[in-house]
Image (cartoon, rainbow, N blue to C red):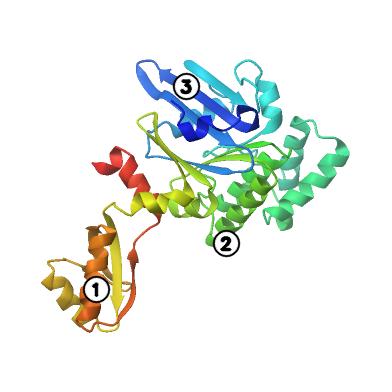
Amino acid sequence: MIEEAELAEPRAEAGIVVEDVTRSFGEVWAVRGMSLVVPYGRVTALVGPNGAGKTTLMLMLATLLAPTAGRIRIAGVDPAADPVAVRRVTGWMPDTLGMYDQLKVHEYLAFFADAHRLSKAERAQAVPALLATVRLDEFALAPVHVLSRGQKQRLALARALIHKPRVLLLDEPASGLDPRSRIELRDLLRRLAADGVAILVSSHILSELAEMADRAVFVSAGQVVASREMSDLAAIGSDQRVPWRIRARDPEALEAVLTGRGLAGTASPAGFELPPMTEDQASDLLAEAVGAGVRILAFGPTGTPLESAYLALTEEGRR
């Protein structure tokens, strides 16, 4: 079932509504009664382990698979009943790249502009603007096959945006991107959300999602486990046991404190990697170290609240 917070969302203002959707492949159930809402003007992260049903859900939203049961609406339209109408308003970037390698980069985007029936004037404006946005303008006349993996990923993003969609589906968009490109992707998605686009992003790079998403939907074994606002995740993780890292001016003095508490901290260039503990346990450790005269330089959980919540809320993460 969709959670109470999501039921409060006016459905007419949601880019994506999924209600009790299932999808099977023979006797294998990839999606088991998933329900979620992706509002306009926000970035929603779809988080879960391999095999959780994320890509299958994305394919259904992109009109490439029909649900076995349940109800989907994209911008108010049923993708099974009118897939063409859904494609007009949806940008889709799959995790597996499909490229026409012999086309030049600008020809590739122009092809998809024509497929979306942009006018010549719109195409002439959109193609160079998007190539500049994804930093591929200098490759406009190069064949697609000469691009690197990360460059092809950026081209696929431009392809998804060519018709200015109201709903954007991104499956592992940061795969193959260098750090600068990941930052630019994050900033671009935030700008699109500010312009009112409903964005659903599936990714295994949780640190990236933590910086770009407004909310997270956690899936496991084909089901939605929980849906949380990113601003609330820190509170969710406060009582959870998560790994910590601590660094001191005098590592030997710190190691003596850790040994005295029975903590088998693993030394690394960034400090001592500590086993999972709660915030209260970490506070006690910090107080004892400072009380012993150890000058602490850095102390905090390793990872983000999103990673902590993922481990706590998914069944696979607790095994």
Give the CA distance from mark 2 to mark 3: 37 Å
Quadrant holding the N terminus: top left
Marks 1, 3: nearer the viewer: 1
Q: Which residue is mark 1?
A: 287
Quadrant holding the C terminus: top left
Q: Which residue is mark 2?
A: 180
Q: Is residue 127 above or below residue 65?
A: below
Q: Which mark sits nearer the N-terminus, 2 or 1?
A: 2
Give the image location of residue 227, x and y in percent.
44, 38
Q: Which mark sits nearer the N-terminus, 1 or 3?
A: 3
Q: Is residue 25 visible?
A: yes
Q: Residues within 10 Å of mark 1 (few under 14, many from 20)?
A: few
Q: Amino acid at mark 1?
A: Ala
For image coordinates 83% across by 46% down, the residue present is 125
Q: Amino acid at mark 3?
A: Val
Between 41 and 207, the residue placed more toward the observer is 41
Between 232 and 96, the residue placed more toward the observer is 232
Displayed quadrant of residue 119? top right
Give the total number of marks visible in the rendering.
3
Q: Which residue is mark 3?
A: 21
Q: Judging from the image, what secondary structure is the residue with disc 2 in?
A: helix
Marks 2, 3: nearer the viewer: 3
Q: Residues within 10 Å of mark 2 (few under 14, many from 20)?
A: few
For image coordinates 27% across by 67% down, the residue present is 283
Q: Judging from the image, what secondary structure is the residue with disc 1 in?
A: helix
For image coordinates 87% across by 38% down, the residue present is 120
Direction from residue 30 to residue 159 in the image, left or right: right
Q: Is residue 48 above or below residue 84?
A: below
Q: Which mark sits nearer the N-terminus, 2 or 3?
A: 3
